[in-house]
Amino acid sequence: MLTVWLLYVLTHIEEIASILEKIGVTLLPLDFSLLKEAEKLKNPRDFEDRIHLATVKSLGVKTIISKDEDFDGIPGITRIF
């Protein structure tokens, strides 16, 4: 799971919105309720990761694809990759 900004930083492709739309990627909004949920979480350590966790929990996602070991041991979430 990547933010569009991070994807741009990694690729330097300015047409990222057009490409994501063309391949069928759905962008999810970041709103105050997700930020507030992320603030309440104690783990993972990084706030960006807590925002991702709050997002997947709000969507009922149980399995994530990530190389980030900070997601290991989070109750209700299985990390693969």
Image: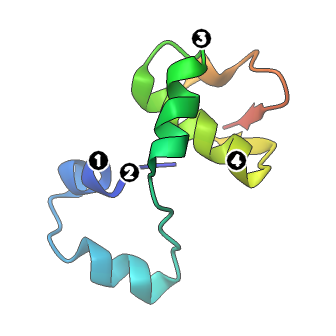
Viewer-side label of 2, 3? 3
Q: Give the image location of residue 30, x and y in percent.
A: 44, 52
Q: Give the image location of residue 6, x and y in percent.
A: 29, 47
Left/right placement of residue 58 relative to residue 31 reads: right
Spatial distance from mark 1 to mark 3, Cα to Cα? 23 Å
As drawn, the label of residue 58 is 4
Name the residue tied to disc 2.
3
Q: Give the image location of residue 76, x and y in percent.
A: 85, 30
Spatial distance from mark 2 to mark 3, Cα to Cα? 21 Å
Specify the quadrant of the image occupied by residue 12.
Answer: bottom left
Spatial distance from mark 1 to mark 2, Cα to Cα? 5 Å
Give SS at disc 2: loop
Q: Which comes before the other along the chain, label 1 or label 3?
A: 1
Cβ atoms under marks 4 and 3 closer than 8 Å: no
Q: Which comes before the other along the chain, label 4 or label 3?
A: 3
Viewer-side label of 4, 1? 4
Name the residue tied to disc 3.
42
Question: How busy is the neighbourhood of tag 4: few (under 14 within 10 Å), some, or many (20 plus)?
Answer: few
Name the residue tied to disc 1.
6
Question: Hey, what amino acid is under mark 4?
Answer: Ser
Q: Residue at x 59, y 11 (%)?
A: 42
Extreme residue in the bottom direction: 22
Q: Residue at x 60, y 18 (%)?
A: 41
Spatial distance from mark 4 to mark 3, Cα to Cα? 17 Å
